[in-house]
Structures are given as structure tokens and as C-alpha cells.
Amino acid sequence: MSDQRPIVVAVDGGGSKTDAVALELDGTVIATARGGTSSPHIIGMTEAAGLVDDLIERLLAQTGDRPLAAAAIYLSGLDLPAEVAAFRDGISGYAWADAIVDNDLFALLRAGTSEPDAVAVVCGTGINCVGVRADGAVVRYPSLGMTSGDWGGGWHLGEQALWHAARAVDGRGPATALAALIPEVYGLDEVQDVIEALHFGRIPNAELAQIAPSVFAAARDGDAVAASLVDRQAEEIVAFAATTLRRLDLLGRPVPVVLGGGIVGSGDARLMGGIERGLAERAPLARIELVTAAPILGAALLALEAAGADAAARSVAVSSLQERPAAVVQ
């Protein structure tokens, strides 16, 4: 006779990968799966739903197709209410259609804190922020890149670095080590080779994010252009956090600011120093909580809480999933 004890499943999807886990109601992790990006902004809404379904099917294949007490799905790219609604429409035919569905920032937030007043900023492939207050108030952002006022994340840092490198090469801008470093990322000789490869599709546009580590490396070596990009990234993270705290009327309280994503996860000294100084000036009572565990931890905790699991179960899940490191930019 098959095991009919209910389980929970959780999915966390970012701009580069998607993690999924199945857990017993006592918090024990019993199955894991990983796929590529599930962001609807990158692969489309239908494809995102299909990828998540494939991951959940892989989990259930490992667990003997046990019934679900709860499912929690948190994806990058579900930024607007209309996008959450569209994803819900896209999953209506799946067995897990009644899952909790929201932006992946909520998984990051829960991975970093359980406090009712909190802010989370993710800076990975892209950048986004969410803030919550104990009375249920929520501040969130469209996160549509430059169109919605955003600056930064690995992809945008790469684009900006290439912009500066192109101008350094043709004489319109100051010299920068990025002009030599960027072609090396793609195994090419010149900046112009990179530009043409992007134009003709030989390098996918999404791979601009691969330049980000070179930006931090050049800044550490004293390159002024690269350093200005790192400093701007710190300023933008601070602007998100401080603005969200102000909009929630939480500047006067000691509130956690949870930071996650591959860019901040690298722990770059210049970046983190800029964030710390900026928050000390604009939100002096805020305290930084850097998430080093993969955000799937937060998604799993939210799934367990939705199923009514107790504190002991959450502790078991934390012990298992904290060992799964978050992605970082080296």
C-alpha cells in the first residue's frame, strides 16, 4: 500500500536557476530537484508554469506521489499582480494549482527573518525589494529594469560595464581595465568582438550577467570606472531599503534588512561597505541580515507554515536547508 502521509513542496525560482524541495510535515527534506530559470520575464509565462510542474513531478516521483498538504511557489518575474494572476491561470490544470504563488523576494525575506516588520532586497541577476509590516501592509516594486526606475543586478552591471568599455576603446570615455577583461569572459579578443557577437546573437543577451565578476575584480584592483559601478550598486540597494522603510513608517524602529542574491552574496568589501555606510546614514536603526543559505529555505518554511507545521518542524528544515549555499558572484 502506498504511503498517503501528506507532504509539502516548495519552489524558489530566480533569474538563473530554480530549486524545489519536498518535506515531511516534521521538516525532514525527502526530495530535491533543480532546473533552469523559471522567470516568466525570461522564458514566458506558459514555459515557467511547465518548468515548475516538471520540478514538482520530479519531486513526487521521488516521494511516491504522496498527497500535498501545501505547495508554495516563489518566482522571480512575478512582480505585478497581473503577472501573479497570469501564472495562476497558467497552472489551473495542474494538480498543485491551489499553491501559494508570489514573488521570490518573499522566500528570501523568510529565509532571512521571521520578524513581522522587515525589508528584503535581492541583487542577483536583477534587483528588487519588498517590505512588510506587522499590520499586513506591503510595499513592493514593478522590477521592470530601467523602465521602472531600477538600476543594477548582474545583468545591468554587465551592460553598463560593456558600455564603458566600448567608449574607452573608441575614445569617447576614460580608459578602463574592463576593456581587456570583458572579451576574456567570452574567450574573444576585443570589445568590438563582444559587441558584434551580442548583436548577431552568438552571445545570448542574458549572458551579459557573466561580466559582473570582472567588474568587482577590476574595482578591487583600483579601476575607477569599475569602482564607480560598484559604488552605484551599493547606493541603489540602500535607496531601495531606506525608501521602503520610509514608506512603511519603519525608519524609527530596529528593523532587519535582509540582503540576498549573487551580487551581495559575494560579500565584496567595497559593495558591503557602501551598503553599511549608506544605511547608517539613511536608516540608522536598520540592521543588515545577509542571507547565505539558498532562498529555497524561505520557500520551504513558508510551505511548512501554510501546512500548520510547528516550530520543531521548521527547525528541522532549517538545519537541513541552511547547508545549501546561495549562489554568489565571485
Image: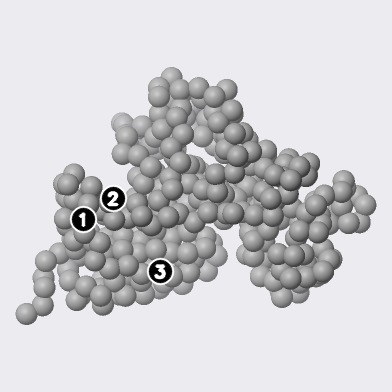
Q: The residue tagged with tag 3: helix, strand or loop?
A: strand
Q: Give the residue furthest to the left.
A: 1
Q: The residue tagged with tag 1: helix, strand or loop?
A: loop
Percent across and percent down for residue 81 are 43, 51
Q: Residues within 10 Å of mark 2 (few under 14, many from 20)?
A: many
Q: Which kind of residue does numbered mark 1 sit on?
A: Gly
Could you tell me how far apart the alpha carbons at marks 1 and 3 are, in whole angstroms? 19 Å
Percent across and percent down for residue 146 are 65, 48
**Number of numbered callouts drawn:** 3
Percent across and percent down for residue 224 are 78, 41
Q: Which kind of residue does numbered mark 3 sit on?
A: Arg
Labels 2, 3: front one: 2
Q: Give the residue furthest to the front.
A: 221
Question: Sequence-wise, which precedes: disc 2 or disc 3?
Answer: 3
Say if residue 87 shows up in the picture: no
Q: Determine which residue is flagged by label 3.
A: 34
Q: In the rendered structure, are the residues bearing label 2 and label 3 in contact, judged by CB atoms less than 8 Å apart? A: no
Q: Determine which residue is flagged by label 2.
A: 318
Q: Quadrant of residue 183?
A: bottom right
Which residue sits at x=69%, y=55%? 214
Q: Give the residue furthest to the right.
A: 171
Q: Residues within 10 Å of mark 3 (few under 14, many from 20)?
A: some
Q: Determine which residue is flagged by label 1.
A: 27
Q: The residue tagged with tag 2: helix, strand or loop?
A: helix
Which residue sits at x=43%, y=45%? 291
Q: In the rendered structure, are the residues bearing label 2 and label 1 in contact, judged by CB atoms less than 8 Å apart? A: yes
Q: Is residue 301 left or right of residue 19?
A: left
Q: In the rendered structure, are the residues bearing label 1 and label 3 in contact, judged by CB atoms less than 8 Å apart? A: no
Q: Quadrant of residue 67?
A: bottom left
